[in-house]
Image: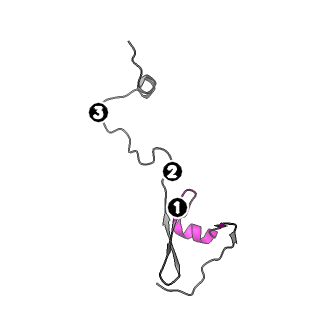
Amino acid sequence: MSSDRVDAESTVSGNQANIPARIRRELDIDDGDHLRWHLEDDGSVRVQVVQQRTGTFAEFDGYDGDAETDVATDHDAWGVDVE
């Protein structure tokens, strides 16, 4: 895919460059997302957006068992032998 069209431009400052707002919106880039940089044989650069889920339990689907739990009691007692 080759194109001479310029969609946006940014300036490098130190080792950083801003991603223009229009590009961020179009590609749904948000804080915490990663950019993978690929240098092509022809000298062009391809950037892949890797979107990140946020939060400690982002991939946790929840408890799917039949037993009722009492999170306060079960959590507070975890690893403690109470007799």
- Proximity of marks 3 and 2: CB atoms separated by less than 8 Å: no
CA separation in Å, label 2 and label 1 = 12 Å
Question: For this rendering, which residue is in front, 6 or 38?
Answer: 38
- Label 2: state its secondary structure: loop
Q: Which residue is mark 2?
A: 54
Quadrant of the snapshot with the C terminus: top left
Residue type at the position of mark 1: His
Name the residue located 51 percent from the left edge and 51 percent from the top edge: 54
Name the residue located 43 percent from the left edge and 28 percent from the top edge: 71
Q: Which residue is mark 3?
A: 66
Residue type at the position of mark 3: Asp
Name the residue located 65 percent from the left edge and 77 percent from the top edge: 9
Residue 32 drawn above or below residue 16: above
Tell me, yes or no, whether the highlighted magenta stretch contains residue 62.
no
Question: For this rendering, which residue is in front, 40 or 50?
Answer: 40
Residue 80 in the image: state x and y as whole percent: 42, 20
Tell me, yes or no, whether the highlighted magenta stretch contains residue 31.
yes
Residue 39 in the image: state x and y as whole percent: 50, 76
